[in-house]
Image (cartoon, helix red, strand yellow):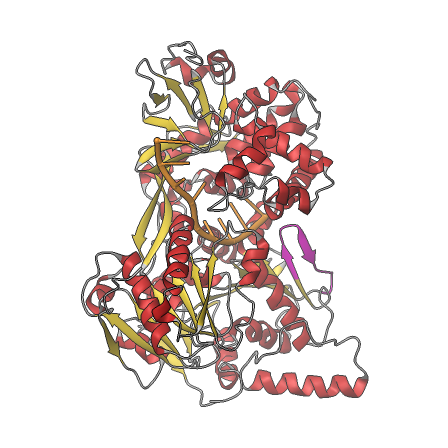
Amino acid sequence: MTGFQEPPFKKVKNENGFSSDVSNDGQQCFKSNNGYIMKNNIQNGGPYSKQCAGTIGLEKSGATQNAGHMKKILKQRHSLPIFPARQKLLEELKKNDCVIVIGETGSGKTTQIPQYIHEERWDRKGTICITQPRRVAALSIAKRVAEEMNTNLGALVGYSVRFEESVSSATKLKYVTDGMLLREAISDPLLSKYSWIILDEAHERTVSTDVLFGIVKAAQSNRNCPDKDPLKVIIMSATMDVDHFSNYFNNAPVLYLEGRQHPIEMFYAKQKQDDYVLSTMSTVFQIHKESPAQHDILVFLTGQEEIDSVAHSIRQVAKDLSLAEFPKLRVHPLYAALPSHQQLDVFRETAPGERKVIISTNIAETSITIPGIKYVVDSGRVKIRSFNPSSGFDVLKVKKISQAQAWQRTGRAGREAAGYCYRGYTQEEFRAMALNPVPEILRSNLASVILQLLAVGVKNILNFDFIDKPSPDSVREAVEQLSVIGAIIASSDNLELTPAGRRMAQFPLEPRYAKAILCGPEHGCTDEVLTIVAVLASETIFVNPSGKKELAIRARQKFHSVEGDHITMLKIFRAFKSSKENKMWCHENFLNYRNLSYAVEVRRQLVQICQRCNIPVLSCQQNLEPVRRCLTAGLFTSVAELQIDGKYLTLSSKQECSIHPASVLFGGKPAYVLFTDLVHTGKAYMHINSIVDADWLYEVAPEYFRTRHIKKVCSAVGS
DNA sequence: GAGCACTGC
C-alpha cells in the first residue's frame, strides 16, 4: 500500500517546554483574579523516579536499611515542586475554609498536602479524605503515601474503593474514589467523619465530583455552627476553569504550583485534513522513517473498529519492501474491551532494532500510562456517548476533542525524556477548539444522580447548587423516569422518595435495574435477576477478534436462548460458574474472563445489599419466564412494537428502531422487544434484547400504558 | 446486515 502524501506539518518549536507552551496557546493557567504563582527552582530529581510504589520491602528491611530508605524518601519529598511552597500553602489553608490548588501531574500535591496537614496535626478532630476519579489511583497513591510515612497500609494511611478497603480506626489519611464518598454521603450527609475533604482531579469533572461539589459545600456550611466541628475543603485541579471553581466556592483563593516536565516539541498540520484516519497513518510512517529504533509512538484514534483496521493497515504497509531498511514495527491496538493479556502487551519493552506503535482510544489519556513513549500522534477526535433528553436515549458520536484533552494527550509523550507531539489539525483549528470538555453531568442521564441526591436528603433538586446546572429538559426526563418506576412521587415543586425508591438508592445501579431486583421476590427469581443485572453492569462479556468473528459466534451458539440476550447472558454466567470460573473455558468460548469475573464480584455485592434490605434471594431454576417479567418491571419504558411494515417503533416515543445484528433475536420478528439500550449509530439499534408479552406491560405499569396505545400485534416469527 | 469511548458505586 502506497500513496501516502508527505504529511504537511509545521513545526512549532518551543524552547521552554510544555508548560509555557500551554500558556502560549491561550490557556488560563496563569491568569486568575485572586491567584498567585508559587515558583520553585528545583530542576533535578524525579519525584517518583523509576521506583514503583510498593516495590520496596519496608517491613522486611533491617533498621539501618530502613533508616537509609527513609532518608532517601525524605530527599525525594523535598525535591518535589510543592515543597518550597509548603509554608505559604499551610498559611492559606489555616486562613481559609476552602482553597483551590492548581498543579500539574508530578507537582506532588496529591501525596504531600495531606501529609503537611497531618504534620501540623490539623486532623485531630477527623480524618482527611482525598477523592480520586479512578480506583487504581486511590489505591496506588495510598500505597505510596503509606510508604512515605513509614506505616503499613490500612493504619495511618488507608483507602476505600468498591470491593476493596483498607482502613482502621487509626486512619487519618484516606484515599477514596469520588463515587465512594458520594455513597457515604447517603448515610451521613454532613460527612462528619472528616475534618478535611480534598477533591482531587477536579478538572476531570466526573458526575460524582460534580455532585460532591454541592454536597461538600452544603456540609461545610451546615457544619459552620458552634456545636459542630468545621469542615475544611481543598479543590485540586490540573488546569483551567480556575475562576469557575473559585466563584463557586465563594471566591476561594487559588494557589498555583509550578510543575516541571520534559519539553515537548509540537507539530501542527499545515492545512486542514479531511481524512483524519489517513493523515494519522501517514504521520506514523513519516515518524517511522525519520526516527531511530526504540522511539515508540502512541496514536490516539476513536474506537475499537477504527483502531483494529488502522492496526491492520499499518502492519500491511510495514511489510512493504521499501521500508525494510527501517526498524521493525510492532503494532498494538489498545482499548478497554481488549482481553487483559493483549492490553498487557503494550507494556512489553521494545527490543533493539524495533519500534512499537500503540493505537489507542482515550483509555491512554488517563487510565493507562505507557512508559517510554517518545511520540504522540493525535487525531484530535474522540468517541463520546451523550444523553439526548428529548428522545430519552443515548447517542454515540465521533467528536473533536477539547484543548484540555489535547494537552492531556500531548503530555503522554516525553514523560521520561524530551518528546514530540504531532497534531492532525492546524494551530488555528486548535485555537477554535473548546477549552474544556463538556462536563459529564451535562450529557448524562440524571436518573441515578437525582435518586442519590434525594437519598442524601436534598429536598429541592431544581435549586440544588450544581457548579454547572443540567438543563431543565434532562432534569424533567430523569424525574419522569423515576416517577414511572415508582421511585419518587413528583408534585408540582417537590420530589418525594417512596419506600421503594429508598431501597433502589441502596443499589450501586441504574434505578431501572434496581427496580427489576425489587420485583424478584414477587416472582421468586431474585437470584436470576441479580445475575443478569450484574452482567449488564459489567463490560461486554463477549470477545470478537476481528478475523475470527464467525468462529466466535459458532462457539457461543450453545448458549443462545430463544427468549433473548438477557437469558443467553444468564446461561453463560451459569456455565461460567459451573466451569469453576475457568479462564481457559472462557478463551475456548470467546468470552471475556476479566469481565465475567467482575460480574461475579458485582453479583456478590448485590446479594449483600439484598440481605441488608431483607430482600429474599430465591431461584426459579429452569422456568425463566418470571425473570423476563422482572426485567420488564424495570425496563418497560424500553419496549418496541413490531409494525405491519416490519419495522419497530418504541412505545415510549414512537421512535423507529431495529434489532441490533449482534442480538440473538436478530433475524426474527418478535412482536414486542424489551431492549436495554438504544444505540444511535446512523440508525437506532436495540442493543441487548428480550422477547416480552404485551400483557406483562399492563401488569407491571398499568398507569404508564393507559395512555400509550399497544396494538397487541402478533409475532411475525416464521411468517 | 451493523459495528460501544472511558470511568465509577
Q: Where is residue A301 in the image (x, y as percent from the top left)?
A: 37, 57
Instruction: Evaluate whether residue A395 shows in this view.
Output: yes
Question: Is residue A61 found inside the magenta-colored segment of the image?
Answer: no
Q: From the viewer's side, name the closer residue of A229 and A25.
A: A25
Q: Position of residue A264 (x, y in %)?
A: 36, 78
In the rendered image, the vertical position of residue A542 relative to residue A424, given as above or below: above
Q: From the viewer's side, name the closer residue of A560 and A554.
A: A554
Q: Residue at x 51, y 34 (%)?
A: A511
Q: Which residue is drawn at 65% across and 65% down?
A: A125
Q: From the viewer's side, name the closer residue of A482 and A92.
A: A482
Q: Where is residue A500 in the image (x, y as percent from the top left)?
A: 57, 28
In the rendered image, the vertical position of residue A338 relative to residue A139, given as above or below: above
Quarter of the image that includes the N terminus of chain A: bottom left
Magenta stretch in the rendered image: A159-170
Q: In this view, does A625 lie to the left or right of A718?
A: right
Q: Which residue is drawn at 70% across and 22% down?
A: A621
Q: From the viewer's side, name the closer residue of A55 and A152.
A: A55
Q: Position of residue A37 (x, y in %)?
A: 38, 81
Question: Is residue A160 found inside the magenta-colored segment of the image?
Answer: yes
Instruction: Evaluate whether residue A499 shows in this view.
Output: no
